[in-house]
Image (spheres, grey):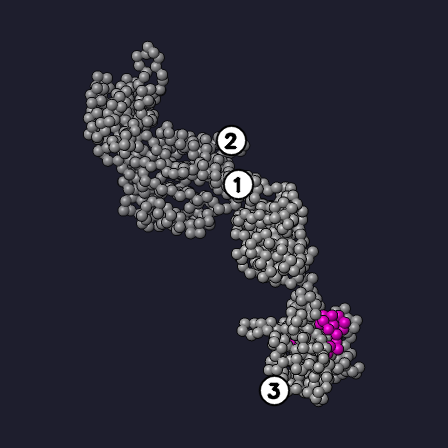
Amino acid sequence: MSPVNPLDDAATARVVVDDDGVVLEWNEGATRLLGHTASDVVGGPVSALCAPGGGCGGLLTGDAASEQRLVSTVPVRHCDGRTVPVGLIAHRRPPRGDRPGRWVIVAPVGETSRPLQPDDPLATVELVQSPCAMAVFDAGLRLRAMNTDMARVMGAPAERLRGLRVTEIGGREELAEVEQTMRQVLDTGKHYSVRTYLPQLGGSGVIRAWLTSMAPVLNGSGAVCGVSLAAHDFTEQLRARERLELVNEASTRVGTTLDVRRTAQEFADVLVPALADFVSVDLLDPEHGGDPPSEPPSPGVPVKLRRAADRSVLGRADAFPEIGELDSYPGTTLQSDALSQARTLIVTDTPEGMARRFAYRDGLARRVVEVGLHSALAVPLRARGMILGVALLARHRHQERFSRDDVLLAEEVAATAAVCIDNARRYSREREVALALQRSLLPRSLPVTAALQAASRYLPAARAGGVGGDWFDIIPLSGMRVAMVVGDVVGHGVQASATMGRLRTAVRTLADIDLAPDELLTHLDDLVVRLSEEAGNDGSPGEVGATCLYAVYDPVSRRCSMARAGHHPPLIVRPGGLPEPVEMPAGPPLGVGGLPFEVADLELPEGTVLAFYTDGLVTHHGQDVDTGRARLQEALAEPAESLDASCEHILARLLPKGDVADDVALLLARTRGLPSSKVATWDIPADPALVAAIRKQSVKQLEHWGLEEATFTAELVVSELVTNAIRYGARPIRLRLIHGASTLICEVSDTSHTAPHLRRARTFDEGGRGLLLVAQLTQRWGTRHTPEGKTIWAELTLLEGE
C-alpha cells in the first residue's frame, strides 16, 4: 500500500448508510481498504459486504439502532474474497428537515493506523503520567497516540481509534471547531484553546463542558510535525457558577410585583429551561380566606391545590390545569407526598412509569409518555412557618436526572420564591380588605337630582402601598341645591380608607346642616387635627392629612360657591367654551389647623360642566401637575356622547395602560337650571292677620302648577311656617315655593339667627304644635343659616302625575 498524504482524506475509509441499510456514499479510503469501488456498492445493501457468518448484518438495526455512536470490530469481505477484520466507528445522523436519518461509518486506513515507532517525534510526547486526558495528532491531524484518560473520554482504546481525525472519532458538529483550531496550531506553531460542550464519547450522553488546550509538536529540526491536545473537564465548576447565577437571577426576577400569580410565574420562568423542562406552581387555598396551614396534610389524603403558574419548553398543553383552576391531587401523587412529608421528593423512572404517577388527570399521562418525561422533583413552598403549596419540576429534554445538587438549588430558589409569594399573598389580602372597605364607603351610585347630571369613575391604586383614601360624593341639599365634594387622604392601605370613611361621613353630616363651604372645611380641618392626636402623633400638624374641595350649586340662582383645602381646582367648561381651571384661593390642606378657607362664587349657565379629580389622574408615573392638567384639559375638550363616555375617554387618554400608582377619582357634573316659572316668591308683612291671604296666594299658585292634590297639605305647612316666622322671627320675611320634578319645597326666610326647636306640646298648651305638624306632614324639613339670617324649609313628596 502506497504512503498516505498527511492531509489526504483517503486515509480514512468513509461509508454512509441509510436506515434501510442501503449504501449511499463510498469514498476512496473505503476502496483502498476493501478494494470495492463506489460503483460496485453504492445503492446496494451494506449487508452484502459482510463476511459469511460474520453477523454484521444487524450492526445498524435492532437494539443498536437506538444508539448514537457504535464502536466495533466487524469481519468484512474484501473484493478478492478474503475476510478482513475492520475496527470501525459508526455515528448516527438524525433526520433533519427533508433529509432522512443515516449512519456514517469510518475506519482508519494505512500507516496512520499503526503504532508510532520509538524514534518518531510524536512518540516522545509524555502522555501516560499526565493528570488530564491527552492525545497526539500528526500533521494530517490523525490520532497517533493517547493516554488512558483520553481513551476513557474517547470511549475506545488507542488501537481502535489510531489514524482517525477528531471529527471522525466523535462525529459531532461541535468537534469541527476543535479540528479547525488544530489546523491553526499546525499553520502558526502557536498554542490555542477552545471550549466545547459535548458528551463524553461512549458515556451516558450527558453534555459536559470541556476546555481543550492544543500545542505544536516539533521534530528535531524545530519544524511543526503534529499537535498535542489536552482536554480538561470543567463541567462541575461551570455548573457551580451557573447555580450561583440562577440563585442571583431568582433574587432579582422573582417578586418584582405584589401579585401572587405574577410572582409564581416569575419563579417558574427562572427555572425553565435553566434547571427543568417543565415547572408548575400550585398553591393551597386557605379556609375562609385565612392563613395557609402550618402543619402538613395527613399522608394519603387528597389535597386541593390551585394552579398559580406553569412553564414548559414545549408551551402549554391542554392536559394542564388552567391558571387559577382548583384541582384535587390524590394522596399518591408526587405533590401530595411532598406536602405530607414536608420535604423535597425525587422520582426517576421510565416515561411509562412516570405516566402512572400522573394518571390522576385526563390526558396528562399520555402527555408524559409523548414528551419522554424521566425525572421529576416536588419542592414544598414554605414561608414564615406556613405551607403555601408545592412546585413540581420535571425533565425530558435534559438527559440528566435530577441530582442532589439540583435539589439544593431548587430548594434555595423555592425558599426565595415562597417568601415573595407570601408577601404578595399578605398584600393581596390587605388590599382586598381595603378595597372592600373603600367600596363600602364610596357611593355605589350617584343620586339623581334636578340640579345636576353627573358621572364618575374610581380606580384603586395598583402599587405596593395598596389602595388609598380618595373619595367623591354628591349630596342633595335643601332648596334643590346640591353639594359636590372630592377629597384625598394622605397615605395608602386600610388606615387611609378608614380615615377617608370618617371624613366622608363628617362631610355628609356637616352638609346636612347646610354649612357654607368655608365653614364646612373649617370643621373638617378640626376633625383631621383630632384624628392626628388620636393616632398618637402628639397632635403634630399634617401627620394625618387630607385635601378636599367642597362646592354647592343652586339651580334656582344658577350660582355655585366653592372652597378648597389644598386640593386641585376643578376644571370648568361653559357651553361652547374650552376647559379652563377655576380661579379660586388654594387654602391649606386639612390637618394644618388654624388657617382660614376662602369661598369663590361663580355664576354657571345651564349646561356648564365641572370636572373634579384627584392627584392620581394628573401626576401618575412622575408626570408633573401642570402637564397632567394640560392633558386633562385636552381630553375634556374633545366631544363625547355623554358624561359617562367622556369619563372613559379621559381615563383612556391619561391612563392608557390602566395601571395607576395612586388612586384616581374623577367626577363630572353638568349643571341644570330651574325655570323661573317653577319658583314663586312673596315678601310677607309681619302681620298675623295677613296669613290667610298668604295661604290663598299659595293655593292659587299651586293650582296654576296643577298641584291641586297637594294644596291641603301645602296650605297647612305654609300657614305654620309663616305664622312661626311672624311670631318669632325678624323682618323682612319671605316665602318661596319651588316646584321640583317630584317635590314641592316651601321655604320661609327671616333675618333672625335663632333656630326653631321641635317640641311636643302638653295637653293644655295653646301653641307649640306647629313644627310637629310640619314634621308629620312633610317628607323632611330643616333649617339652614344664611348670612342674612335663617331659612326654615320643608319638602312635600308629590304624587305621580302631579
Please tell me whether residue 260 is drawn above or below residue 597 in the rendered image. below
Residue 190 in view, yes or no: no
- What residue did someone put label 1 on? 430
Residue 634 in view, yes or no: yes
- What residue did someone put label 2 on? 533
First in sequence, mark 2 or 3: give its number. 3
Cα gap from disc 2 to disc 3, whole angstroms: 104 Å
> Three-letter amino acid code at disc 1?
Glu
| SS assignment at label 2 | helix
Cα gap from disc 1 to disc 2, whole angstroms: 25 Å
First in sequence, mark 1 or 3: give its number. 3
| Label 1 crowd bin: few (<14), some (14–19), many (20+), radius 10 Å | some
Please tell me whether residue 373 is drawn above or below residue 29 in the rendered image. above
Q: Point out the frontmost of discs 2 and 3.
A: 3
Q: Point out the frontmost of discs 1 and 2.
A: 1
Please tell me the numbered disc located at residue 348: none
Please tell me whether residue 216 is drawn above or below residue 700 in the rendered image. below
The structure residue drawn at horizontal position 40% and vertical position 50%, both measured from the top left corner, is 652
Cα gap from disc 1 to disc 3, whole angstroms: 82 Å
Please tell me whether residue 184 is drawn above or below residue 393 in the rendered image. below
The structure residue drawn at horizontal position 28% and vertical position 28%, both measured from the top left corner, is 745
- The residue lying furthest to the top in this view is 764
Marks 1,2: beta carbons within 8 A: no
Q: Who is closer to the viewer here, 574 or 701?
A: 701
The structure residue drawn at horizontal position 25% and vertical position 31%, both measured from the top left corner, is 802
With 556 as the anchor, is 274 left or right in this view?
right
Can you give x and y, in whole percent of width and height, for residue 442 in the image? 43, 37
Q: Who is closer to the viewer here, 661 or 360?
A: 360
Can you give x and y, in whole percent of width and height, for residue 218 in the image? 73, 80
| SS assignment at label 3 | helix
- What residue did someone put label 3 on? 39
